[in-house]
Image (cartoon, rainbow, N blue to C red):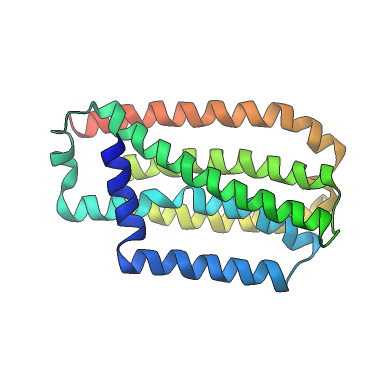
Amino acid sequence: MKGIILKDLYENFYIKKNLASYIFGALFIGLAMIFINTYYTFILYTMFLSIIFGSAPLEAPCEQDEKANFGKLQITFPLTKAEIVLSKYLLSLICTGISLLISLIYALANVYFWRLVTLREALTVWGLSICGSLVFTSVVYVCYFLLGKKIGTFIYVATAVILAGLYGSSTVLFGIESYTSMDTTVRLWFFLPASVVIFVLSCLLSIQIYKKNFS
């Protein structure tokens, strides 16, 4: 499993075009966080940073595997098919964890440096980002394993755009305060375990899809 993870890391961060896309994305979001910092954008940045970057590490390896027909070679490795899929999900958890850590630092900066939100509000939004990243990754990864790189990437981008649209429309319909209300904080006790269950079910489903594809 370690070898699969290292291969995927290589394809994500050593291939120049992929590395450049990560650097550009990080610089764009970083500058936006510094120069465009409002209550609205605080929620947007905190939630979508982990949602988008947490699920990104599968796109590049999927592209390279399809080009080289690596999938057929990969199943000859001394690993079970379940372990191959688990390695993909484990890498997504690592990247999601890093993104969540950055989001937490940003959220706390808005509490203690910019004084834009309270600690409870910051942690509530951060908790929502955990739920969102797990559910988003669950959906996107199943699509990649089931439909391949091209359609999987299309669904990845389309879902991200839809989520951004839903965020914008929900702030108009329900008010931006709905994301940081006490009711939302309480609901996190349900949302968090539910998102973990969805992630586990996604992993199990992807394993079955992978086994069927290479049976």
Q: Is residue 4 above or below residue 107?
A: above
Q: Is residue 151 left or right of residue 103?
A: left
Residue 12's spot in the image, x, y percent? 35, 56
Q: Quadrant of the N terminus?
A: top left
Residue 67's spot in the image, x, y percent? 19, 56
Residue 99's spot in the image, x, y percent? 56, 50
Q: Is residue 75 left or right of residue 35?
A: left
Whether residue 175 appears in this view of the structure is: no
Identify the residue at image location x=80%, y=53%: 173
In the picture, residue 120 is in which quadrant? top right
Identify the residue at image location x=76%, y=67%: 37
Q: Is residue 135 left or right of residue 71?
A: right
In the displayed orientation, state which residue is furthest to the front: 113
Q: Is residue 211 left or right of residue 191?
A: left
Residue 23's spot in the image, x, y percent? 47, 67
Q: Quadrant of the C terminus?
A: top left
Q: Is residue 111 above or below residue 145?
A: below
Whether residue 86 appears in this view of the structure is: yes
Identify the residue at image location x=28%, y=55%: 63
In the picture, residue 17 is in which quadrant? bottom left
Identify the residue at image location x=26%, y=40%: 3
